[in-house]
Each structure stands twice: as C-alpha cells, then as structure tokens.
Amino acid sequence: MRFHLPVYALIVLLASHASGGAKADDAKLSKSVGQLVKELKDKDSDVRAGAAEELGKKGPKAKDAVPDLIEVLSKDTDEDVRDAAADALGKIGPAAKAAVPALTACLKDKSADIRVVAASALGAIGEEAAPATDALLNLLKDPNDEVRETALETLLVLSPLPPDAVPSLLLALKDKKRAVRAVAAECLGEMGPEAKAAVPGLIVALGDAERKVRAPAAEALGLIGAKSKEVVTALAGLKGDESTIVRCAAAQSLGEIRAHRDIAAPALCSMLTERGHPTARYAAAEALGNFFEGKKKSSEAGDDRPPGGQQGEAGKIQYSEGGQGSPGKDQRKKI
C-alpha cells in the first residue's frame, strides 16, 4: 500500500506523539515514593495533586508516604489536592491506619466530594477505622446522596455496629435513595439481636417498592431473631412476592426464626409448589427442614416447648435475581 507523503508524515507524527505520551506516563509511574513526596510540597497545586494521585497508584507500596499525605490532607488549601490525598490514603489501605483521625475530620469538610472520598478511604482502611463510626453515622443526615450512600457502605464494612447506631440506621431505612435504604437494612441485620429495636421499622421496609430493600429487610429480621407473631406474619406474607430474592430471604428467615409454625409452615409449603425460580423452592424446603430439626432436638432433650431454640447462623443472600451461593458482606455487589 502506498501513502502520499503528507499522509505518511502525519501517521508517523501521531505514532511518535502516542509513544511519547506513553513514555511520559511510564516515567510518572517509575518515580520513587521519595520523589513524589517531594512533589507534594511543590508550589504548583497541579503538581501536588498529581503526586498524590501517583502515590495512590502505588497502593500499599506507598505506605512510607502516609505521614506526608496526612499533612497534605490536613493543611493544603487546594480542594483538588486534598481530594487526591484522601483518595491515595484509601488506596494504600490498612497500612494508612494512622490517617483515620485526619480522614474523620474530613467528614465535616465543606466539599461533598471530599466527604465522599474520605468516607470511602475509611472503608478501604477497614476495621482500624472503627473510631470513625460516630462521625460516619452523623453523615447519614448529609444532604448529599452520594455522601450518605458512601458513609453507609463504610459502616457496613465496620459492622457489626454498636446498639446506639440503630436510630441513625432507622432514619437511613427511610431514605429517598434506594441504595441507602438497602445498605441500612444490611447493617441492621449484621447487628443481630442488638438491633431488636429496629424490628418495627424493618417490618415496614418489607413493603418497600424496591426488591433490593425488601430482601435485606427480610434477611435482617431473621438475623435479629425476632420471633413475634407480627414478624412471622409479615415474612409469611412475602410468599407471593414477585421477586425471587425476596421470597428466598423470607423463607430463610422463617427457617432461622422457627416460631409460630401454624403461620410459617403454610407459607413455606406454598413456596414449595410455586412454578417460579427453583432457588425459592429450595429455600422453602430448607426452612421447613429447620422446623422439623428443631422439633427433633426438642424431643430428644425432653423439651416440650414449640420448635425454635437458639438462632442459627444465617447464610447470606446475594441480592441479584437468580443469584446462588451465600457470600459474606465483603462479597456483596453494590446495589
């Protein structure tokens, strides 16, 4: 194939430019942590922000830069630089645990973007960020949707939360944003019996218009172990829910609660005969088995109480239609 000279020259020029850009990017990545730390003190805010970003790309390998990033986060006057520093600390992960106080302070920053990045970074640091729990709970009243959602996602990482978190989580359970309501229900479930004060609110959430809220609400009631007739009746009422994951969550919780068999058993039998997804039928069969297992154990122990006994450890439901398996909270997809 022959090219006219001007066209060929243009192709060569573009190829050279692309190659030069790639080399420039490689040069940035090849900079040492020490070099990038020096750039954090540059007079040019773009240079400082770029240095923080490059440190973030190095992940845990940039742990020696944590003190300098903390200083930038706390003292730099440029919002973009502070944002990049917070993001870098999150990418460094648990090795950046010394940054928890500075990141917690950023949860009150006037910039919503920085509040989001700081909350996310605390979640990436993990359990070492537990001291930020109260500040994160306060963010559940934040006017910014993304701030509230990110705060809850981090609170889920820090779960189980203390009992005094229930009022804030109940507020989030009524949030206008579906993802916030869903994660609030998950957080309550992770608290187990400590969240018993949330039972009335979770019963209301079973009627939420979104299946990805109804399902974690149903699961939470089982994890809390609420055995009241009102709870069992509400869960049994989900036997005809249009969503497979909601029916599965309801069946699983009825099997965990193992109370008021006269109400639960007919609902579970109804799920057994449905023509929908087999996962719901399997969950119903397993739940019914729990009732009989409870009866057998009570009989062997000479106990004439109705089947129930101690709450077992509930499996986790993946909140996607047709999902199988029982992933833990760290494996759940963002919804």
Image (spheres, grey):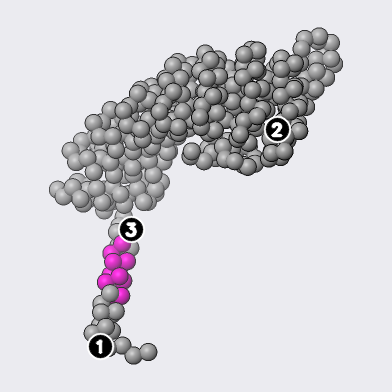
Q: Secondary structure at mark 3?
A: helix
- Residue flagged by tag 3: what amino acid is it? Leu
- Please check the rendered image and state whether residue 18 is part of the magenta-colored stretch, yes or no: yes
- Residue flagged by tag 2: what amino acid is it? Ala
Placement of the N terminus among the 4 image quadrants? bottom left
**Circle number at residue 20:** none
Question: Dot 3: few (<14), some (14–19), or many (≥20) neighbours within 10 Å?
Answer: some
* Residue topped by disc 3: 29
Q: Which residues are magenta?
A: 15-25
Q: Taking 84 as reference, is 232 above or below it?
A: above
Q: Secondary structure at mark 1?
A: helix
- Picture coordinates of residue 8 (x, y %)? 28, 84
Q: Nearer the viewer, mark 3 or mark 2?
A: 2
C-alpha gap between disc 1 and disc 3: 36 Å
Q: Residue furthest top?
A: 304
> In the rendered structure, which disc, 2 or 1, sits on the residue that comes first in sequence?
1
Image quadrant where residue 226 sits: top right
- Please check the rendered image and state whether residue 240 is part of the magenta-colored stretch, yes or no: no
Q: Residue furthest left?
A: 43
Query: Visible in this render: residue 56?
Result: yes
In front: 198, or 137? 198
* Residue topped by disc 1: 5
Question: Dot 1: few (<14), some (14–19), or many (≥20) neighbours within 10 Å?
Answer: few
Query: Visible in this render: residue 297?
Result: no
Which SS does the magenta portion mostly show? helix
Q: Nearer the viewer, mark 1 or mark 3?
A: 1
C-alpha gap between disc 2 and disc 1: 71 Å
- Picture coordinates of residue 180 (x, y %)? 44, 30
> In the rendered structure, which disc, 1 or 3, sits on the residue that comes first in sequence?
1
Whether label 3 touches label 2, CB < 8 Å: no
* Residue topped by disc 2: 283
Whether label 2 touches label 1, CB < 8 Å: no
